[in-house]
Image (cartoon, rainbow, N blue to C red):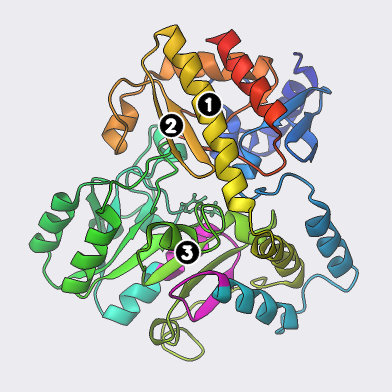
Amino acid sequence: MAYKRSSALFHEASQYIPGGVNSPVRAFKSVGGDPIYIKEAKGAYLYDEDGNELIDYINSWGPMILGHAHSKVINAIIEKAKLGTSFGTPTEIETEIARLAVSMVPNIDKIRFVNSGTEACMSAVRLARGFTGKEKIIKFAGCYHGHSDSFLIQAGSGAITFGSPNSPGVTKGTAQDTLLANYNDIENVKDIIAANTNEIACIILEPVAGNMGCIPPKEGFLQELRNVCDANNILLIFDEVMTGFRLAKGGAQELFNVAADIVCFGKVIGGGLPVGAFAARNEIMNFLAPLGPVYQAGTLSGNPLAMAAGLAMLQELNTDVDIFNRLKEKTDYLHAGLRKVLESKEIDFTINQVGSMISVHFAKEAVVDFNSAKAGDNQQFKDFFHALLAEGVYIAPSAYETWFLCDALTYEDLDKTIEACNKVL
Ligand SMILES: *Cc1c(COP(=O)(O)O)cnc(C)c1O
């Protein structure tokens, strides 16, 4: 495949945009080479500026769970745009999507819409601090919660692949309020709590980690977190920006039957437009301005265009009763095919999967936390990435990213993918 036009566009962009991109992981720095410029997308396929056709396993990093340019979502955006895109006043559609989201997700009474997953997590932590009157937070190494200061402490994917887990610009004061725990290690969490009695406002985590590859919670881990939170008056925040409306209607809370105190959303909830949200029971949400003292605001938050896209997406997910099952079955099929190929090649590998999230690690030992994720063979991943790309299969350009499957993928696409893996490995 030729990427002449993509490379030319990237070099042009690099003159005006830092690193040529508006979000670092797009730059291909961790796999080498120039990024690919996409011109359009439909269903499970991307079409780039050089006329190449690619099967897409990134799906805009998660939002496109129905496939690209889904007609219901696109029509909702077009019709809404004709009426004006933002008024800075309340609109009825905000209530419609809020009512639907609250009906789909367990343990929440109210939801506040923002513009990104970063904003959702940042605001959720502020709310937890305001509500509990405590300041410290626990996060897990390798979990990503957006790029706000408190979270840029061993933050997974972009931050790992760029070798700057502790970004300059984050103050020592901020960093010291973020306590770092090992994913899937409840004893470590208990030790940290014991060493910081009555100081911890919340524990925030990805209930299925997706930013160090896909890492499922160990059996019982989420419930044990729930228990230690209850015993210590700590709020449990599930960052479901990736898992929300993807693993089940009610996200990881539903799948694992564990209740969080605050839940963060992004990605799927916006149907491909910039949307985030956070939600909790009344007692907590009523602490937010204008009802309560914790401040949070946004000029474009809940704008009609974004809400129309999100509402069309959630309506589709709410009415298509089989969708999450279908997605899981397709991913199971891909998983089995990849496993067979990798076993036949005698390559060290681990495949992790939960529902429609899957990742291949070139590592011998089970990948259960940040350290075991880092043990993967990065050179092997780079070669695998570029070889797959040449076969028309587009996976995320980093060994620390999850593959996301969309409903538009056919079994023929999956067979092509498995065959491409067989060829390149
Ligand atoms: C993507 C992501 C975020 C950040 O969302 P943005 O919309 O990129 O700001 C936060 N948490 C998780 C788990 C994510 O995957």
Tag on residue 280?
Answer: none
Looking at the picture, does residue 299 appear above or below residue 284?
above
Give, as a three-letter code, the residue at label 3: Cys
Seen from the viewer's position, the closer of residues 128 and 391 is 391
Q: Which residues are magenta?
A: 104-124
State which tag comes first along the sequence, 3 or 1: 1
Is the residue marked by circle 3 packed among few (<14), some (14-19), or many (20+) residues within 10 Å? many
The residue at the far bottom in this view is 291
Tag on residue 264?
Answer: 3
Q: Nearer the viewer, mark 3 or mark 2?
A: 3
Give, as a three-letter code, the residue at label 2: Thr
Which SS class for mark 3? strand
Q: Return the x and y of residue 121 as percentages of the image width and height.
A: 45, 62
State which tag comes first along the sequence, 3 or 2: 2
Q: Is residue 119 visible?
A: yes
Count of marks overlaid on the render: 3
Give, as a three-letter code, the residue at label 1: Lys
Is the residue marked by circle 1 packed among few (<14), some (14-19), or many (20+) residues within 10 Å? some
Q: Which residue is mark 2?
A: 161
- The answer to whether mark 3 is within 8 Å of ligand 1 is yes
Q: Is residue 404 left or right of residue 254?
A: right
Q: Which image quadrant is residue 95 in?
A: bottom right
Which SS class for mark 2? helix
Distance Cα–Cα, label 3 vs label 2: 24 Å
Q: Return the x and y of residue 281 as percentages of the image width and height.
A: 42, 81
Q: Is residue 297 visible?
A: no
Q: Which residue is mark 1?
A: 29
Distance Cα–Cα, label 2 vs label 1: 8 Å
